[in-house]
Image: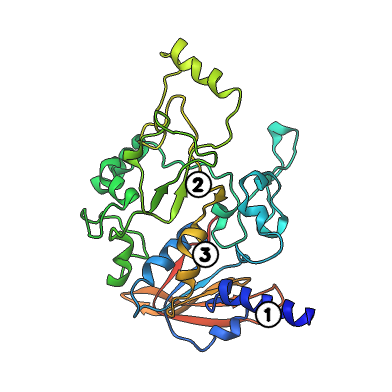
């Protein structure tokens, strides 16, 4: 009786949390047809998969070398913010640097996420958009105002469901086909600013006007006050010229002293995977996500206007494992991190 009860609980768990589109056996996708094959289910790959499959007629395969961000007995280690200092090796590529001469030839660990969501599933969750000066510099170098802070901010906020601005002249390789222009259409907001874990009043600690209210990426201010906070902020009053107070580090001006913003919502990590490869997205009939599988090489499938065309990928689950090939009808998108 106890065994039956346990089996029923397991079945109910699978029905509630399982995903028909999260695949661990590459042979299950061997004979399927895909419009797009996305290499890497990290920060960029998760978003692309989500956006492209909003079109029900577009079929997408994501190939991720790492594991699931929601399955396994140790997933709490990447979900609970305070556990970030001790991420299990199975979630990491376990890279190390070459010996550093300035550090007496020591090697250092170089953490990179080996899991759906990439490093957004394992990082320290600092939320920063960068400086407006950097965006404006990119616009000057490229000669395209579409990359300026003013032009990019609506895309960061994703404030409406229409194309707000002209496309930049320098479009990423993936944006070749009309269906891929979804990446530049402004759907509902990307971010939701959530209350801090302790529920305190955040008035005067952040500018809600430069944040979203309905997006899947959850952000918040710290919910664990420190005795040092007041002392640090006191410097912005006593030495304002040297340490100016900054109401919002993500307003385009990151200089000064202000409150940390994190990709944490309701006390839990918010990542590219939780935001864009959530259960509703994974259950889309036009999306398959293959995990634990590496792309070993791109396969040339022809030539166009004198240039090679690569619409095939070779897959394997280990160095000595069997190889198989998958072909995309429209495009292979390389977003495998670095």
The vertical placement of 49 against 262, above or below, is below
Q: In the rendered image, which quarter contains the N terminus? A: bottom right
Q: How is the image coloured?
A: rainbow
Q: CA distance from mark 3 to mark 2?
A: 18 Å
Q: Of label 2 and label 1, which has the lower sequence position?
A: 1
Dot 1: element: helix
**Which residue shows up at 60% across the image and 51% down it?**
122
Above or below, 159 against 6 in this view is: above
Where residue 118 sits, quadrant-wise, is: bottom right
Q: Secondary structure at mark 3?
A: loop
Q: CA distance from mark 2 to mark 1?
A: 35 Å
Could you say which quadrant of the image residue 284 lies in?
Answer: bottom left
**Helix, strand or loop status at disc 2:** loop
Task: Evaluate whether residue 99 shows in this view.
Answer: yes
Q: How many residues crowd mark 2 within 10 Å: few (<14), some (14–19), many (20+)?
A: many
Give the mark nearest the N terminus, 3 or 2.
Answer: 3
**In this figure, which residue is indicated by the disc labeled 2?**
263
Marks 1 and 3: CB-CB under 8 Å?
Answer: no
Q: Residue furthest right?
A: 2
The disc label shown at residue 8, or none: 1
Closer to the observer: label 2 or label 1? 1
Q: Earlier in the sequence, mark 1 or mark 3?
A: 1
Please tell me which residue is depicted at 34% across the width and 54% down the height of the picture.
Answer: 189
The disc at residue 41 is 3
């Amino acid at each position: 009786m106890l065994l039956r009860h346990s089996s029923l609980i397991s079945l109910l768990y699978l029905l509630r949390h399982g995903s028909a589109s999260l695949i661990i056996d590459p042979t299950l996708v061997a004979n399927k047809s895909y419009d797009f094959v996305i290499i890497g289910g990290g920060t960029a790959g998760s978003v692309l998969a989500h956006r492209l499959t909003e079109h029900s007629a577009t079929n997408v395969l994501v190939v991720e070398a790492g594991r699931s961000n929601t399955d396994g007995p140790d997933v709490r280690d990447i979900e609970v913010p305070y556990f970030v200092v001790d991420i299990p090796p199975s979630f990491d590529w376990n890279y190390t640097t070459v010996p550093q001469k300035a550090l007496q030839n020591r090697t250092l660990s170089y953490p990179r996420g080996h899991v759906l969501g990439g490093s957004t599933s394992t990082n320290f969750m600092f939320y920063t958009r960068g400086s407006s000066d950097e965006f404006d510099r990119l616009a000057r170098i490229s000669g395209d105002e579409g990359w300026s802070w003013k032009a990019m901010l609506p895309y960061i906020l994703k404030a409406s469901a229409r194309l707000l601005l002209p496309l930049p002249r320098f479009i990423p390789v993936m944006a070749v086909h009309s269906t891929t222009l979804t990446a530049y259409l402004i759907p509902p907001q990307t971010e939701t600013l959530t209350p801090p874990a302790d529920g305190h009043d955040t008035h005067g600690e952040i500018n809600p006007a430069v944040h979203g209210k309905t997006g899947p990426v959850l952000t918040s201010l710290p919910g664990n006050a420190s005795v040092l906070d007041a002392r640090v902020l006191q410097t912005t009053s006593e030495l304002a010229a040297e340490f100016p107070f900054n109401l919002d580090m993500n307003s385009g001006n990151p200089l000064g002293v202000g409150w940390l913003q994190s990709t944490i919502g309701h006390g839990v990590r918010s990542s590219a995977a939780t935001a864009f490869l959530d259960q509703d997205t994974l259950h889309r009939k036009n999306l398959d996500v293959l995990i634990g599988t590496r792309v070993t090489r791109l396969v040339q499938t022809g030539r166009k206007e004198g240039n090679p065309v690569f619409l095939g990928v070779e897959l394997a689950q280990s160095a000595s494992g069997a190889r198989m090939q998958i072909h995309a009808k429209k495009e292979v998108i390389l977003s495998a991190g670095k």
